[in-house]
Amino acid sequence: MKTIINIAYRFMPYKITLILLFGIILQVSAQSNPERFRVGITAALDNNLSSESFAFTEHTGYGADYNKTNYRVGLNVEYDLKKKITLNTAVYYSNKDFTGTYYCAVCEFLVLPQPQTIELRFIEVPATLRYYVLPEQWKPYVEIGVNNLFALKKGVVNDAYKEETIDNSYTLGLKLGGGIEYEINPRFAIRLLADYNKGLTKLIDKSGFKMDYWGIGIGVLTRL
């Protein structure tokens, strides 16, 4: 419980700002143009493309093996700007765990470090523009924007029971994507998607580690 409280406290400024901004936009726009909004749920499986060296310093870090099942799940909102163009945002819980083997170039180990699960979790808040190529019942689309990633914890415990710390709890990525949507009726739709996140800022300064991944997913949407 204490850990949960500490995490919530550390990220409270980000959460308050995002919630207030998102709420104001949603409330003002929905009151005047509720039919231009769609809300939905999206889930995706991700493949981590980040560096194979998760280094904290010049001499210490993890050799990364991205063999874990990574995923995102959360709520998304779409606002119609024009007939084929929409503004999109979402709030996702994101799991980017991996298998890491601790290394230290200046240490002497009595027992060699064994592979272990490294927990890397985020709250992701993307903001994109989406273009629907064909505004028909089947709607292929492309999108571009940014992805804000907020790390849920900065500490990582290694095999020697020493906590290492990532430098930045916030990192920014470029988001590119596309997919196809099927309109079940004027109110409901289902969507298949694929997207790519290219890290623009560093999670760890010393090694320049950034979050790169691609994913495929499915979502359902309803018009307000």
Image (tube, helix red, strand yellow):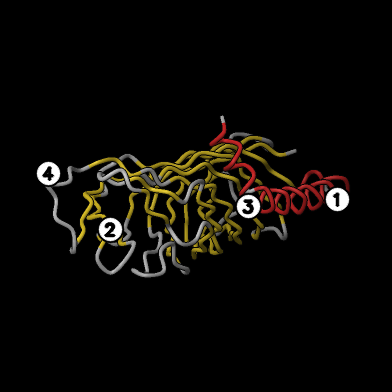
* Percent x, y of residue 2: 57, 33
Q: Which of pointers 1 and 4 lies earlier in the amino acid sequence?
A: 1
Residue at 42% x, 55% y is 165
Q: Nearer the viewer, mark 1 or mark 4?
A: 4
Q: Nearer the viewer, mark 2 or mark 4?
A: 4
**Amino acid type shown at disc 2:** Gly
Label number found at residue 28: 1
Which residue is label 4 attached to?
A: 111
Q: Which of pointers 3 and 1 lies earlier in the amino acid sequence?
A: 1
117 and 192: which is toward the camera: 117
Residue at 76% x, 54% y is 21
Which residue is label 3 attached to?
A: 89
Look at the picture and state if 101 lies above or below 74: below
Q: Is residue 35 left or right of residue 32?
A: left
Q: Is residue 192 left or right of residue 184?
A: left
* Percent x, y of residue 11: 62, 49
Specify the quadrant that holds the N terminus.
top right
Q: CA distance from mark 1 to mark 4?
A: 61 Å
Q: Nearer the viewer, mark 2 or mark 1?
A: 2
Q: Nearer the viewer, mark 2 or mark 3?
A: 2
Crowd rating for badge 1 (residues with CA inside 10 Å; few <14, some 14–19, many 20+): few
Under tag 2, what secondary structure?
strand
Specify the quadrant that holds the C terminus.
top right
Q: Which of pointers 2 and 1 lies earlier in the amino acid sequence?
A: 1
Crowd rating for badge 3 (residues with CA inside 10 Å; few <14, some 14–19, many 20+): many
**Amino acid type shown at disc 3:** Thr
**Amino acid type shown at disc 1:** Val
Q: CA distance from mark 3 to mark 4?
A: 47 Å
Under tag 1, what secondary structure?
helix
